[in-house]
Image (cartoon, helix red, strand yellow):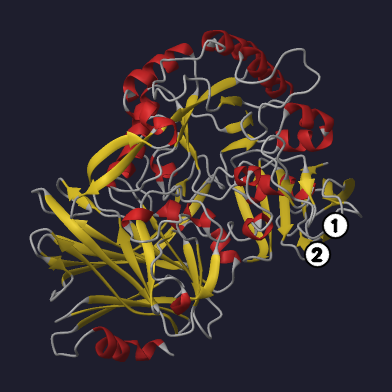
Amino acid sequence: MKHTSLILILSTLCLSASAKTQILSLSSPDGKVLTEISAGDSQLCYTVAYNGNTLMAPSTIGLELADGTTVGKNSKITSVKRKSVDKFIASPFYHSDSITDKYNQLSFNLGHGWAVEFRAYNDGIAYRFVNSNKKPLKINNEIVEFSFPKGAVATVPFVNTKKIQSFDTQFFNSFENTYTIDSLNKLDSRRLAFLPLSVEPVGQKAKVLFTESALIDYPGMYLNAQGNTLKGVFAPYPSVEQQGGHNNLQMLVPERENFIAEIAGPRTLPWRITVVAPEDKVLAETNLTYLLADPLRLDDISWIKPGKVAWEWWNAFNLDGVDFKTGVNNETYKAYIDFASENGIEYIILDEGWAVNKKADLFQVVPEINLTELVEYGNKKNVGLILWAGFQAFARDMEKVCKHYSEMGIKGFKIDFLDRDDQKMTKFRADAAEMCAKYGLVLDIHGTFKAAGINRTYPNILNVEGVHGLENLKWSPETVDQVEYDVQIPFIRQVAGPMDYTQGAMLNAAKGNYRPINSEPMSQGTRCRQLALYMILESPLNMLCDSPSNYRREAESTKFIAEVPTVWDETVVLDGTIGDYIITARRSGDTWYVGGITDWTARDLVVPLDFLSPGKKYEAEIFEDGTNAHRKGRDYRIRHKNVEIGDAMNMHLAPGGGFAIKIKPE
């Protein structure tokens, strides 16, 4: 349907047509993405179109306030302002050192002290509400709808819980699940999906993806399918919190208020983002979450050090050939420090177990651990220590904890088991980032919702989980298809920011060979797939999940992983289709790294080298699936090739396979 017909749609489907109806339009800088906004006697609505074709039908937005006002209902648009922006912004600790911020903006007042801003980018539409009221107020609900003509197909991550009797039972969750793909109107209306998620409108080549940014001190958004419409759902504000959950480290919410947010004064609400992708790789390339995040709030970021981490939890502290019993003790951690130092790895992590269990007290250290001694040992080896901390153990004494361990020489914290995204929890993430920055500490946050732009605002938050990462293969049954998930998340979850997926397995299972073994876990797919994930996935603080003993046996793979940067000067997504395959190239200095992965279908892919600099000769080191990788996932081979701009590489990927290439100037 052509966009010239959108006004008719709006007047007939979204509003009762009347002379009072006001319609505004906003298009992207290239003119291909269009939104039309309508206000009048009923709701405030908007549509999204691409190249003249309707992608998203009229969808209602608004705010229900505690005083009975509904912002957007019976509203009159006033004080319309437009502007265009075209600039570069610095993007430290990201997949490019700077990115283009180019958009057209439309803003207008709605009365009651509220305004709306819409932005149109070449790859999407975003809007947010702006409050200018100086007095405090409460928001009972935010009205968010994404409506589609019948037949749209959705790819959604449902909240992973057996308790789906009500929405309230789903607000407590870890934000990690594989994807469900089905017609939008067939999705379970009892279940909540968390962001991001994508929709393919019927009969359209373009897809859309929904996410949010600038999510600080406001509840995160879930979506719930009601027929052909996805409706926003927000966790109400906690009225009662009780310590409990995993090892008494969580704060459970048995009772909630009848509002979702308290607003203290003038502020903006989070951006609601619709990414528009005429081809799938646009989803993997988009920077909208980062661009729409709140700007940097730290005065100095020169101290922040991204890097890789030797991690003991996934591999169950496994070391062989040593003369001590491995586990939570100084001997084990010194061995991990030795391994990290040998390979130029910046950090090790002390995951759960170094503090006394079930006390939620980070000042009670188990007798087997001497942290001061480990810090001193790490300093001699140029390896920093990061400490795992359960949410309540960290939150209860945040400044005292940060000050004490910073003075000891600890470099950061991995905070886990937040498992909520109501307003109190989104505020905690920002508060924790500010407190850690005050004491020079980096953060990796687990058991939490997607980054949603906080890595731009507080770049000492180097990584965020909110992903069904490799840790799940310690216990997941054979029916869980991690290989399929791996070729979905670069197009969906990664749109919302970095993710602590924790790749790097050296035990690799070809199709049919995987089984969960908690103490000696394996990955699904091939060895080269694990190497490729270091380029395909974005993790400024990136784990080496396997045992130092396994890495020492696999010296070639370990050397490659250890050399891969975790932040980049430039990123190019060369090709890809959601759920099938992806090829990503990233540059650090004058060296390029290219990674490609496939699903369980063997593929022959072409890698064009048009991204190389003209006039230069390069040498490529290529890790590719071995001849028998379809039977034995660890089978790989290495070859070298001289290349230059304009060349192309033909790569064969085994089922569940991948390739990893390092290209450096001769």
Circle 1/circle 2 CB separation < 8 Å: yes
- Residue named by callout 2: 602
The kind of secondary structure element at disc 1 is loop
| 642 sits left or right of 320 in the view | right
Residue 28 sits above or below residue 558 on the image = below
| Rendered location of residue 53, percent (x, y) | 46, 85
Quadrant for the C terminus in the image:
top right
Kindly identify the amino acid type of the residue bearing the numbered disc 2.
Ala
Please name whichever residue, 257 or 169, is drawn nearer the observer in this view of the structure. 169
Q: In this orientation, does residue 302 appear?
A: no
Residue extending furthest right?
627
Q: Earlier in the sequence, mark 1 or mark 2?
A: 2
Q: In this orientation, does residue 606 appear?
A: yes
Which residue is at 37% across, 40% downward? 296
Which residue is at 11% across, 53% downward? 133
Which residue is at 21% across, 51% downward? 261
| 87 sits left or right of 528 in the view | left
Quadrant for the N terminus in the image:
bottom left
Kindly identify the amino acid type of the residue bearing the numbered disc 1.
His
Within-10-Å neighbours for mark 2: few <14, some 14–19, many 20+: some
Within-10-Å neighbours for mark 1: few <14, some 14–19, many 20+: many
Residue 231 sits above or below residue 227 on the image = above
